[in-house]
Image (cartoon, rainbow, N blue to C red):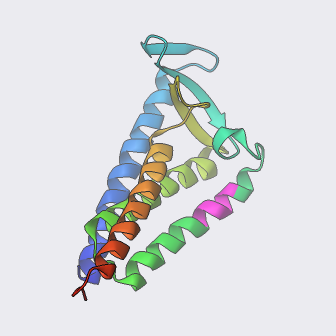
Amino acid sequence: MPRHTAAGLALAVALVVAVLDQASKAWARIALHPGHEISVISGWLWFRLERNTGATFGLLSGHNWLFIAFSFVVVLAVVILVLRRNPVDPLGVGALGAIAGGGSSNLLDRVRFGGVTDFIEIHLWPTNFNLADAAIRIGVVMFILALLLELRRARRPGSI
């Protein structure tokens, strides 16, 4: 995949993730009230508004400035990786776009609101999250899968 095509795909995925995440967080800030839950699927999925100034699971809560810096570095690293690595696999490029979009959207929340807006809670997950968090996690898994597939292709006899 040519570098400009990879950059375009990554940018498109990042923009879709960021726009959907920001729209869903705006809805949550308007429709949900702190301390109250809205059950979506009884006992399994509900919405509850929280502001997270730390990382996943509330780690390092109150250190928003640290995560502003970390998010900026991660997004910058993804941009450099897409532009310099010359990714061939659309799966890997899309994964990097999801990571950049989620990271950018959470970074925007941290700068604008002093923390990330979380509102989705699932029974099997220990803390609530947002669409950006989901995109980052899914992007990391997809990127690892893309790397493993790339390694597998490289090890095949007769591969370039």
Q: Is residue 38 left or right of residue 53?
A: left
Task: Determine the residue positioned at 33% across, 78% down.
Answer: 87
Task: Determine the residue positioned at 76% across, 42% down.
Answer: 61
* Start-end of magenta stretch: 67-72
Judged by its main secondary structure, the magenta piece is: helix
Snapshot quadrant of residue 91: bottom left
Residue 84 in the image, given as x and y percentages of width and height: 41, 85
Q: Please, which residue is most extreme toward the front here?
A: 157
Tally of numbered discs? 0
Q: Is residue 10 left or right of residue 133?
A: left
Residue 151 in the image, given as x and y percentages of width and height: 37, 75
Q: Is residue 60 left or right of residue 116?
A: right
Task: Determine the residue positioned at 44% across, 63% down.
Answer: 144
Residue 16 in the image, given as x and y percentages of width and height: 32, 52
Residue 54 in the image, given as x and y percentages of width and height: 70, 45
Quadrant (top left/top right/bottom left/bottom right) for the N terminus? bottom left
Residue 3 vs 14, above or below: the answer is: below
Quadrant (top left/top right/bottom left/bottom right) for the C terminus? bottom left
Is residue 71 in the magenta section? yes
Task: Determine the residue positioned at 47% across, 70% down.
Answer: 78
Is residue 107 in the magenta section? no
Q: Nearer the viewer, residue 58 or 88?
A: 88
Q: Please, which residue is most extreme toward the top here?
A: 42
